[in-house]
Amino acid sequence: MIATHLPVLQVAVPLIAAPICVLLRRGSYAWIFTTVICWGLLAIAALLLDQVMSGGAISYRLGGWEPPIGIEYRLDGVNAFVLLILAGTAALMMPYARQSVEREVRPERRHLFYAIFLLALTGLLGITATGDVFNIYVFLEISSLASYVLIAQGTRRRARTASFQYLIIGTIGASLILVGVGFLYAKTGTLNIADLAVRVPALGETPAVLAAFAFITVGVLIKLALFPFHMWLPNAYAYAPSMVSAFLAATATKVGAYMLLRFVFTVFGVHFAFETMPLTEILLALSLIAVLAGSLVAVFQSDLKRLLAFSSVGQIGYLGVGIGLASVTGVTGALVHIFNHALMKGGLFLAAGTIAYRLGATDLSALHGLGRRMPFTMAAVVIGGLGLVGVPITSGFVSKWYLVQAAFEQDLWPVALFVLAGSLIALAYVGRVIEAAYFRPPPPDSEPVQEAPWAMQLSTWALIAGSVYFGLHTDLTVGIAERAATVLLAGAP
Amino acid sequence: MTEHLVLRVISKLLIPPILLFALYVQMHGDYGPGGGFQAGVIFGAGLILYGLVFGTEAMRAVAPPRLLVVLACLGVLLYAGVGVASMIGGGEFLEYGALSADATHGNHVGIIIIEIGVGIAVASVMTIIFTALAEWR
């Protein structure tokens, strides 16, 4: 009986758990409770993905109302895969959370921190699971408001400004999406994605559909933080608490990419988005600038967390390239990169957090000689960094392989060239970190540094090891992503 | 505000009807305009008026912040609890009809409990926001 309710439990369980976390009143109890919930969510996500892979799309009617009147949760290969990424990274980061949060968040706020973390997770899972465009907006607001609060918990005062900046830009993005959804609703009278997928193409190129397309695309690109809408991202990731940086870097922009896929491919359809509208040209141009500019700016950062944040701006560009190419190979590459980048960047931000935990700073100058003093953490940074470059064996190689292949399929060799150039620049910024940690002597007056606590290393290494494992065993990720891409490009969900 | 005698007397007269009207809007939501959100806002406005006139200290005595936080959570849990109960009753999440053997009766019960949850949560959160801003230094 419970198996039929899994789609709604995926979203309702963290929503119910959040107020319970507040009632627990103690940070340590809230941590244990949140850990149990997150692993439960991972189990639900795995079961759902298994159901979808063996039995096709699942539909769940909320409140027993028949879609398209009622709200439907609809899971196909695409969002079941993204749900697994979200629940998986949250679960793997929980061992890390206890000590990191104890260090960075005041005792009377810790249980509230976990409650808001669960709300952010609720929002992200909800956006992914739902089959209703207005529901997407509601969950987007839940996750965004929770993220603003989480970012503002950073220990430095600049966290507040970063959070406020994100609040303003994020609200603009969400409002644009809402306006676009309003246009669609006015024209079709439905909010259900599967229903919209039938009715919107039938409307043709009416002004309302064009306006809806423009509003929704720009709104989603702001949430995705694709160049030139990335301005909120570096500060937000650099000044948030370590746990939050890692969690948001691994999940928030990935959900943005999912929204773009869902709106463009399912709601508007490949034909309208890429043939009637010049989305390929726009996405490719912006994404390639993002890859080059984001990576270049990362090279000149003096702080590890900011460097990783700008690297994220570049890596989001790769997602844009894959989506913009609008072929099965390209979308497969984008989906695989969503998965791989969540592991790599999540692991790297966790490692940066352990460095901040021991040193109190993440300046590259503070990293001097750290390769000997925190060997395990720095090894994780190196492996994760090589993944960002896309060195073979790491999973970053797999996603870039597909992107380059997709570019060659369409004879767009300059795109392939840009992707490879991005990798070279990534080598430069990863090289700077390696140089600081391994080839510079520690400052003479430095105090001895201990290796990070084992629980924090466990999370870091779980994600980094995952990124290597899925570089060698691509059947699982690529297999699922390929099927999902085929579903998306076939049009109807 | 000790010197504003008129304000003090009038608010003392007004606050009980405001709270009572909130409960009316809460219960009337089943038959006409109204419901949990509006009722919660009106109830919260009554408490906030008390806080504005008599000060946050007096308000803390009436509505302790710790109690308000617990109430806000219980309100949400009441809402979600109905969803879970209807799943146990054999329906989908939030399918109130499954709460009772008679679907119409189940719908009545479900919507009333949910609206009460919304009302409690909204009234508490409104008051928490007011206290947080009023005591912010």
Image (tube, grey):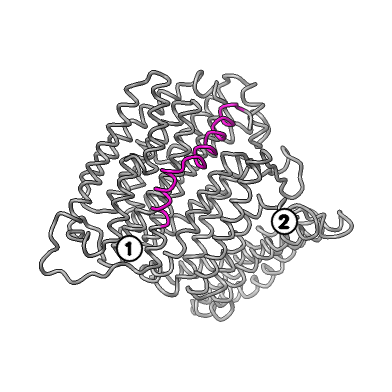
Q: Is residue B61 above or below residue A489?
A: below
Residue at x-position 54% and y-position 52%? A123
The amino acid beneath tag 2 is: Ile
Callout 2: SS: helix
- Observer-nearest residue: A88 or A65? A88
A440 left or right of A153 in image: left
A86 left or right of A321 in image: right
- Observer-nearest residue: B120 or B32? B120
Q: Count of labels shown?
A: 2
A435 left or right of A136 in image: left
Q: Earlier in the sequence, mark 1 or mark 2?
A: 2
Question: Residue A2, which numbered label?
Answer: 2
Per the rendered image, the range of residues in magenta is: A462-491
Callout 1: SS: helix
In magenta segment, residue A130: no
Question: Residue A354, which numbered label?
Answer: 1
Question: Residue B29: x, y in percent?
Answer: 75, 57
The amino acid beneath tag 1 is: Thr
Q: Quadrant of the N terminus of chain A?
A: bottom right
Residue at x-position 73% and y-position 54%? B94
Residue at x-position 30% and y-position 26%? A417
